[in-house]
Image (cartoon, grey):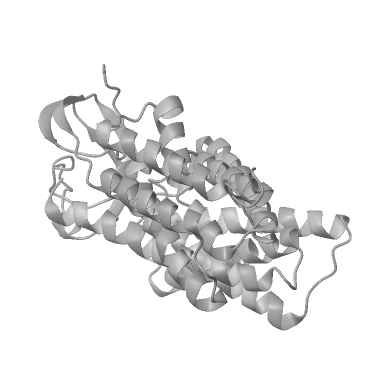
């Protein structure tokens, strides 16, 4: 992986984090006027409609360019799983938790999404992690427990458990999305947004939730477009080059950005828990993003389709009469012959091999 190709997915993950960071404090403002289920519906409908409009504009302006691989029938189970876990369950649970939790605490607790994503990736999808990532998980988990304590009356805040549950649902979503991350990001965002938003809207109406005013609907939809839609598209692209665990390590900057915004917007006084949790989470995030992985590994023969450029370490095929494609991003079905080599890599779409120890 060259410096250029390694830097791009990191930039995409950090930009995704910045966009998503605004959702927690701004949702906290909107949640006072809108039922959580209905707010979740408008957030995801905004992201889905926005992705549809952007995608339509791009296809109309450049109909000859097919830069991304499209979703297929075999991708449907992963897409549906991502919609249910991350598009329906996670935002609804989070918004209920935000009702009874300070925005600053909730923002910092969202770091647990990276832990949940990594644990699911390791246990169920066999992503390899080293000692640094293991210690990162331990530190962030301890910080989450400290943040959940209520020192005045010994016990745990129920709102914080809801936020941690949302992180777990998003961890499931992230790993499901990882398996279709080689597909067109805007198409994934469109289906996730429209599917999750429609389901939540119907559920809210069945439960008798009344619609808010037009301005609130537009604000929620706009926030969904930016904080959910564009953020999801960027993190999908980042997962191609980094794998889900490492992409969400960089994405872990979102809670810290959100924390700063929350303290500024709501003028909240930082608690003793917050300072301890912040220190542990900063250390945990640093350990995760500085992890390195290199060893001799074998690539078996593989035929697949995804957006790529070449030449690089894994794309040295030729295009008869179309040499110009070498310098631009393009997508087509192509074959990788067996290859054994040694270089630093992440569990991207070309490095999802198993490890013996």
Q: Quadrant of the N terminus?
A: top left
Instruction: State the residue in front, 136 or 47.
Output: 136
Give how far across and how far down residue 72 sits, in percent: 50, 42
Furthest residue in direction front, as rendered:
152
Residue 51 visible to the viewer: no
Q: Quadrant of the C terminus?
A: top left
Q: Is residue 284 toward the left or the right of residue 196 in the image?
A: left
Instruction: Please say if 242 is above or below 328.
Output: above
Residue at position x 43%, y 26% from top? 123
Give how far across and how far down residue 235 sits, in percent: 40, 54
Furthest residue in direction bottom, as rendered:
215
Q: Is residue 17 toward the left or the right of residue 33 in the image?
A: left
Residue at position x 37%, y 58% from top? 253
Furthest residue in direction left, as rendered:
342
Furthest residue in direction top, as rendered:
356
Where is residue 300, by image quadrant?
top left
Residue 176 visible to the viewer: yes
Give how far across and how far down residue 327 sits, in percent: 16, 59
Instruction: Please say if 58 is above or below 322.
Output: below
Give how far across and how far down residue 280 sits, in percent: 37, 48
Residue at position x 63%, y 77% from top? 219
């Amino acid at each position: 992986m060259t410096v250029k190709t390694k830097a791009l997915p990191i930039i995409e993950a950090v930009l995704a984090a910045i966009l998503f960071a605004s959702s927690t404090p701004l949702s906290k403002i909107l949640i006072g006027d809108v039922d959580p289920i209905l707010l979740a519906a408008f957030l995801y409908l905004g992201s889905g409609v926005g992705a549809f409009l952007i995608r339509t504009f791009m296809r109309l302006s450049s109909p000859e360019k097919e830069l991304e691989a499209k979703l297929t029938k075999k991708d449907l189970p992963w897409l549906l799983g991502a919609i249910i876990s991350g598009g329906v369950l996670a935002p609804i649970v989070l918004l209920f938790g935000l009702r009874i939790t300070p925005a600053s605490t909730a923002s910092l607790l969202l770091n647990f999404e990276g832990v949940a994503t990594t644990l699911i990736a390791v246990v169920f999808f066999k992503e390899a992690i080293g000692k640094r990532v293991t210690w990162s998980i331990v530190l962030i988990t301890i910080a989450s427990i400290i943040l959940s304590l209520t020192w005045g009356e010994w016990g745990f805040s129920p709102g914080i458990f809801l936020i941690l549950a949302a992180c777990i649902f998003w961890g499931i979503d992230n790993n499901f999305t990882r398996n279709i991350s080689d597909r067109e990001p805007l198409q994934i965002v469109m289906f996730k947004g429209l599917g999750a938003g429609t389901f939540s809207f119907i559920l809210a109406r069945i439960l008798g939730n009344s619609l808010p005013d037009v301005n609130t609907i537009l604000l929620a939809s706009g926030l969904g477009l930016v904080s959910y839609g564009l953020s999801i598209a960027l993190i999908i692209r980042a997962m191609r080059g980094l794998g889900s665990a490492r992409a969400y390590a960089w994405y872990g900057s979102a809670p810290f950005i959100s924390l700063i915004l929350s303290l500024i917007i709501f003028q909240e006084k930082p608690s003793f828990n917050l300072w301890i949790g912040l220190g542990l989470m900063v250390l945990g995030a640093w350990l995760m993003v500085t992890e390195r992985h290199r060893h001799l590994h074998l690539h078996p023969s593989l035929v697949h389709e995804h957006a790529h450029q070449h030449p690089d370490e894994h794309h040295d095929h030729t295009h008869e009469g179309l040499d110009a494609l070498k310098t631009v991003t393009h997508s087509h079905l192509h074959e990788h012959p067996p290859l054994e080599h040694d270089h630093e890599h992440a569990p991207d779409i070309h490095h999802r091999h198993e490890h013996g120890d």
